[in-house]
């Protein structure tokens, strides 16, 4: 009598345990504690970055106050008319004594704002006494003030002798190639443009007038703010230090996230799944 073939039971492939949610890894005591520590360290570093910016601001304010407290000196004592404007002379308070040049040499700088209004800076050459005595007349360009229109009565060119105080400012950096054919109204405050418009030598700088001790020149004009001092390069290092602290703070939080994700993907031994499914098999007849 034939015997029926027998088959051995075949075990089915066990299903993998369900993946643990990321939030369960984050909420384990170890990773929660490390997160709190990372955030605390990042907060301290952020505060240090803000502190470095405050150091920069205080240095800038101190430099401004120190420069403003220096007694003004004659403009011709800072540099000669033959040389360029030295960086150390920018924003220095100076005095200038001389005679106003002819009215035809006065110029205007357009598109200048004052209290929310557009207008013009009035710039007049001042022939310095020291250069006249030397036999080679030279002038410094004085920014006398602001007017809403070139026809404003206050913009009338002054005459006679004057002694004034102001701050040194350099030529503006923007392109002035379009100013050549615009007569006495220019777009930029630049000595290389103005030097071709007068018949005498001029200093490579402007004096922004703040007061007149003797003579006329500022009557009816709105004063232009004097130039700020150059940026203190030592202070710029503090800005760099501040950004470094903020980068360190961001890196600390990023490093915690990277380590936590690596532990989550590898299966954190501190937090195994609670309900591991037991493998089961089926037997076919």
Image (cartoon, rainbow, N blue to C red):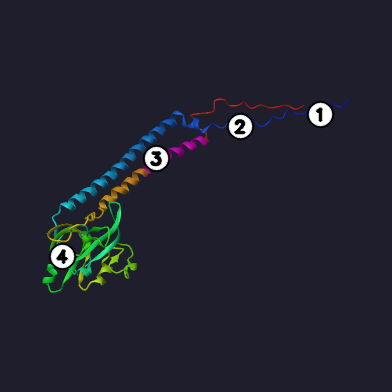
Residue 40, relative to residue 181: is it above or below? above
| Mark closer to the chain start, 3 or 2 | 2
Given residues 153 and 272, the one toward you in this image is: 153
Residue receiving disc 1? 5
In the rendering, at what x and y percent does residue 283 appear? 73, 26
C-alpha separation, residue under disc 3 versus residue under disc 1: 67 Å
Label annotation for residue 76: 4
C-alpha separation, residue under disc 3 versus residue under disc 4: 56 Å
On whether residue 264 falls in the magenta region, the answer is yes
| Mark closer to the chain start, 3 or 4 | 4
Q: Nearer the viewer, mark 2 or mark 1?
A: 2
Residues packed near mark 3 inside 10 Å, few (<14), some (14 to 19) or many (20 plus): many
Occupied quadrant, residue 156: bottom left
C-alpha separation, residue under disc 4 versus residue under disc 2: 88 Å
Asked whether residue 135 is in view, the answer is: yes
Q: Nearer the viewer, mark 4 or mark 2?
A: 4
C-alpha separation, residue under disc 3 versus residue under disc 2: 34 Å
In the rendering, at what x and y percent does residue 26 appear? 47, 32
C-alpha separation, residue under disc 2 versus residue under disc 1: 34 Å
Callout 2–callout 1 Cβ contact below 8 Å: no
The magenta span reads 247-265
| Mark closer to the chain start, 4 or 2 | 2
Name the quadrant of the C terminus. top right
Does dot 2 land on a helix, a strand or a loop? loop
Q: Which residue is found at the position 12% from the left and 68% from the top?
A: 130
Residue receiving disc 3? 252
| Mark closer to the chain start, 2 or 1 | 1
């Amino acid at each position: 009598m034939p015997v029926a073939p027998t088959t051995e039971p075949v075990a089915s492939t066990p299903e993998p345990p369900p993946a643990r949610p990321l939030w369960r890894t984050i909420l384990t005591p170890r990773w929660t504690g490390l997160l709190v520590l990372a955030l605390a360290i990042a907060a301290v570093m952020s505060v240090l970055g803000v502190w470095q910016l405050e150091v920069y601001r205080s240095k800038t304010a101190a430099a401004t106050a120190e420069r403003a407290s220096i007694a003004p000196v004659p403009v011709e004592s800072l540099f000669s008319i033959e040389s360029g404007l030295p960086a150390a002379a920018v924003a220095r308070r100076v005095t200038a004594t001389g005679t106003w040049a002819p009215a035809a040499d006065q110029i205007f700088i357009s598109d200048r704002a004052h209290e929310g209004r557009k207008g013009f800076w009035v710039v007049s050459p001042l022939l310095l006494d020291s250069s006249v005595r030397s036999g080679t007349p030279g002038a410094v360009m004085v920014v006398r003030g602001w007017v809403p229109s070139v026809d404003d009565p206050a913009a009338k060119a002054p005459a006679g002798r004057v002694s004034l105080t102001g701050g040194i400012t350099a030529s503006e950096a923007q392109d002035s190639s379009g100013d050549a054919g615009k007569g006495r109204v220019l777009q930029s405050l630049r000595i290389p443009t103005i030097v071709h418009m007068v018949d005498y030598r001029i200093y490579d700088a402007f004096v922004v007038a703040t007061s007149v001790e003797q003579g006329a020149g500022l009557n009816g004009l709105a004063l232009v703010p004097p130039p700020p001092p150059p940026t203190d390069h030592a202070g710029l290092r503090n800005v760099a230090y501040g950004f470094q602290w903020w980068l360190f703070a961001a890196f600390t939080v990023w490093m915690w996230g990277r380590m936590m994700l690596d532990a989550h993907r590898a299966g954190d031994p501190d937090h195994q799944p609670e309900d591991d499914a037991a493998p089961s098999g089926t037997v076919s007849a």
